[in-house]
Amino acid sequence: MIDLRKIDYATQRVMIGKADLSNLFKNGLEYAPPVRGKWNIVHIGFLIPESHQIFVCAESCLRGVVLTAHEAGAAKRFSTIAVEEEDVLEGDMETEIIEGVSDIIKRLETKPKAILVYTSCIQHFLGCDLDFVYQELKNRFPSIMFTDCYMTPITRKSGITPDEKMRMQLYSLIEKPEKMDTGITMLGNVIKLSETSDIIQLIKKSGRVYRDICLTKTWSEYQELGLSSDLIYIDDAAEKGAKELSSRLGKNLIKLITSFNFDQIDKNNKKLANLLAVEDFDFTDVKKEIEQKANELKELMKEWKVSLDYTATIRPFSLARFLMDHGIKVAKIYSDVVKSFDMEDAEYLKKKFPDDIQILSPSSPAAAFMHKTGNNILAIGQKAAYFDNTPFFVNIIDDSGYSGYGGILEILNLMKASLKERKNISSIVQVKGWGCEG
Amino acid sequence: MMNAANKIISVYTGDVSGVCSALYELDGMSVMHDASGCNSTYNTHDEPRWYDKPSRVYISALTEYDAILGKERTLIDDCVNAARDLKPRFIALAPSPIACVMGQDIQAVGKIIEKESGVPVISVETNGMHSYIAGVSEALVGYAKRFVNSQLIKKNDNLTINLLGATPLDFGNAENVEDLKNSFEKEGFYVNSVWAMNSSIEAIDNSASSDVNVVLSSTGLNLAKYFENKFSIPYVVGLPWGEKALKRLSSMIKTATLGGNLLNYKNSKNGDIAIIGEPVQSASLSYLIDKQSQNISLLSKLTEDDIYALGEENLEESLKGFSMVIADPLFKPLVSQDCNFIEFPHFAFSGRIYKEEIISLADDKGDAWLKRNNL
């Protein structure tokens, strides 16, 4: 039995006023809580309709991804090739991949339109010639498209991250169309935008076609993503992939980065409205509604505090700033880092509320013993719900498609509803890839 | 035929997770030496205790730069710092495929960490390319070498036994292991320790005082051999699944005290029932069923009669001609539709998907399971 009195939490938490925002916590051993809502590279790959995934890695690395596929009910779209000691010693990794993929394709009852071959850290350290591998596979199976995907967590802190790379490869199979139309294609989202989001409202007003990989069900719908004249993205993790696609297809690209700041939202909406040539847009009513709802929540939450985490939204500090400015007390933010695009909001909070908000590292070793019940805590996000052991939580992942003023209103509504609803924490937060059905 | 290519079936838990699972309840700190995020496989799919029972299991968050530059100092410092904050009894190191490719000397690293932290270190030679059986085995033996001494503190006048090789990977949950323990106690044995679930650390460390070891799974076999060599404790292999097996094991334990190791086993090369799984469980299931059956495993062989299948296609071929297959549900796609398939979930294969359906077959529960399945 572990004596919890001996655990030292000092290196795991800091008041925002004393935090070095560009270097919140020291690197070291890492813990992972039993909270699994965020999508991984398997879930994201399944967004390509009629595709099949093949992972090539050591058995211990395969285990997590193969069971991700089974849990998502998509085992038939997923295969594996285990790298064994002999492959490492004999240096025939290229043959292993080519023959393994060929063998699997021959045994598939239905031939997929595309195959995503995921290689791992080990191939990269062994200097495996992946260009040769993919060329040979294309020669052997000309009717199938192949793309290179990566499970290389070792690169998480150097260069392009696996998440960014996955969101890039997601669109790598889109062929350049002969013609284009006036449609708008959203890039990098894994959860479709809510109908109430400003982006959807504005595009509807313009009468232009809206496309998103989350809405595609067939290979041809996937290819139609390339028909749109304009590409947009709202998540910073999509930026590299979005730039690559716009450059390859020769498309206009617009960044509408998610924010909870009214000025930024106005800028985004104006930028999109200009693109769409929509002049009569007006979000005054929804802004008023937001103010009313925030006031209502402030009254309801006099005895409550909010804890939120980086999995709920890509802008945890922006959301915290919005709530604090509206009198809703945020006590904790669970995040290991402040991302560059969220830094301005973090600095604002540091200056204005130095002693009100604590930042906690969800991955530091002591976090393993942080699962403690707090009273009157409304959590936003699964990790916050787990760590504070509170059944009162807003279950959203990466903003869950809530964007702009419409998104803020939806989140405020969810907060209000969550104050009254006791959710079963363990049965919700342990589900991998919330909302993904392979 | 590509032995390493699986079109549809799952893979078994790897050796790195096996180390963490084996040592989970022993108040140590297990460190997977691998990239950030790789611990999620263990936490999500290999460790059912993760939500309710905290333990010190971490990832070293190996980076590309540290790997290329061979910066072992990062791992050493991180372990020493964490040990200072968390006060573990020991530190276990379980290296990944990348550490293997780097040729990292994990024994030397372990010695430096031990010297700088003052905490005993168990360095296990994993590489992510072997199954959990290797990881659990090595971790348990590594722990025994550091913490089990030969002081003979007799706890009980009854014949005293240790149960070796109990992890959730093979038995799903603590209740199923408790059932096994209760079965032996019902037969009059004093169960000193269970390696390594539901036992006090004091009992585990005092295992050398027992008369006989009972090996519950392949993961406990090397530990039994270590105890035999080091402390002259004989062992028997088998699970008390069904009353008949319990009685037989009980008799074997008594016989073993006279010297020699015994295996409770039944297998027939010409059987028309195939059992796929962990070899000791399959052997025990064969004994429980008491019909012509054939044990097949992707893991290892317990005896020469077992079939060791190399990969999915090979396994599919091996299953042809059987009228009944008993196996984890994730093997079902390999079985023909006219074959009677009896689901027997194994956590080390299907993880948490069928967690609630992993049942105890201890003692008369095994006989009840036979009846339910008309066997």
Image (cartoon, coloured by chain):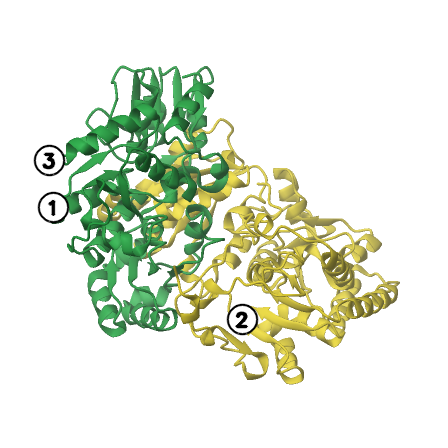
Chain letter behind tag 2? A
Q: Residue at x 69, y 74 (%)?
A: A321
Is residue A6 visible in this depiction of the protein?
yes
User: Which residue is label 2 attached to?
Assistant: A360
Q: Position of residue A203 (x, y in %)?
A: 79, 55
Instruction: Name the kind of residue labelled 1 in the image.
Output: Asn
Chain letter behind tag 1? B
User: Which residue is label 1 attached to?
Assistant: B229
Q: Position of residue B210 (x, y in %)?
A: 20, 45
Q: In the image shown, does A13 or B318 lie closer to the viewer?
A: A13
Instruction: Name the kind of residue labelled 2 in the image.
Output: Leu
Q: Colour of chain A?
A: yellow
Q: Secondary structure at mark 2?
A: strand
Instruction: Name the kind of residue labelled 3 in the image.
Output: Gly
Quadrant housing the C terminus of chain A: top right
Nearer to us of marks 3 and 2 is: 3
Q: Colour of chain B?
A: green
User: Which residue is label 3 attached to?
Assistant: B259
